[in-house]
């Protein structure tokens, strides 16, 4: 998944997200910091949201079931991973991947998972804390090995 795919997916779901939250077009436009005219154009499929608008949508509506179902789990994790190419610092508690994730490999206290929808990878520890995210499988496997080695010391 890349920026354009996320823009395509979420632009086409903007009206559903607005309706899910019970917002009028005026309120949704205000929250996103765009004009009502722009929102209407996006909702009618005449234009697409831009990356900044999509990131704002993911941040401000991160609890949206529609966004989660489109991106697979945490919207912020997906856009953050895309924006930075990878995340290589512990980022806090997750739910452990019971719904949107499949386990790829486990070494010691760490496990590599892949998101079933966005296809990005992440490494979790035994406490379900996220240590790493990337769309690059080889890099994720390499980082899993490094973290497992460091845990042995």
Image (tube, grey):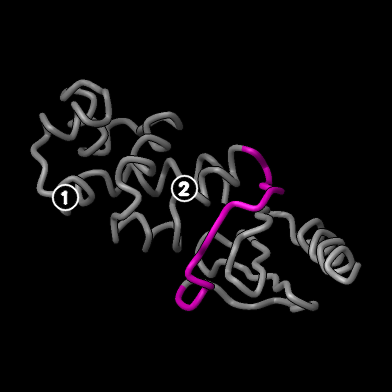
Q: Is residue 110 left or right of residue 67?
A: right
63 and 82: which is toward the camera: 63
The verdict on residue 11 being magenta is: no
Label 1: few (<14), some or many (≥20) within 10 Å?
Answer: few
Q: Position of residue 127 (x, y in %)?
A: 60, 71
Residue found at x 52% / y 51%: 77
Chain part drawn in magenta: 84-99
Q: Is residue 97 above or below residue 52?
A: below
The verdict on residue 90 being magenta is: yes
Q: Which residue is mark 1?
A: 21
67 and 37: which is toward the camera: 67
Mark sitting on residue 76: 2
Residue 102 falls in which quadrant of the image? bottom right
Q: Quadrant of the C terminus?
A: bottom right
Q: Position of residue 40 (x, y in %)?
A: 17, 31
Q: Position of residue 143 (x, y in %)?
A: 81, 59
Q: Secondary structure at mark 1?
A: helix
Residue 112 falls in which quadrant of the image? bottom right
Residue found at x 51% / y 40%: 4
Residue found at x 35% / y 50%: 62
126 and 82: which is toward the camera: 126
Label 2: few (<14), some or many (≥20) within 10 Å?
Answer: some
Q: Is residue 66 above or below residue 41?
A: below
Q: Main secondary structure of the magenta part?
A: loop
Q: Is residue 9 left or right of residue 90?
A: left
Kindly check if marks 1 and 2 are in contact, taking CB atoms under 8 A apart as contact.
no
Residue 104 falls in which quadrant of the image? bottom right
């Amino acid at each position: 998944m890349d920026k354009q795919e996320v823009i395509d997916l979420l632009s086409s779901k903007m009206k559903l997200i607005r309706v899910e939250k019970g917002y009028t077009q005026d309120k949704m436009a205000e929250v996103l910091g765009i004009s009502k005219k722009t929102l209407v154009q996006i909702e009618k499929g005449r234009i697409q949201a831009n990356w900044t608008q999509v990131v704002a949508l993911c941040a401000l509506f991160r609890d949206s079931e529609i966004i989660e179902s489109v991106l697979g789990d945490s919207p912020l994790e997906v856009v953050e991973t895309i924006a930075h190419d990878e995340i290589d610092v512990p980022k806090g508690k997750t739910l452990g991947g019971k719904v949107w994730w499949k386990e790829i490999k486990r070494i010691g206290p760490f496990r590599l998972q892949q998101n079933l929808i966005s296809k990005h990878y992440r490494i979790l520890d035994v406490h379900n804390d996220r240590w790493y995210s990337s769309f690059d499988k080889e890099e994720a496997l390499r980082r899993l090995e490094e973290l497992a080695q460091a845990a042995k010391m």
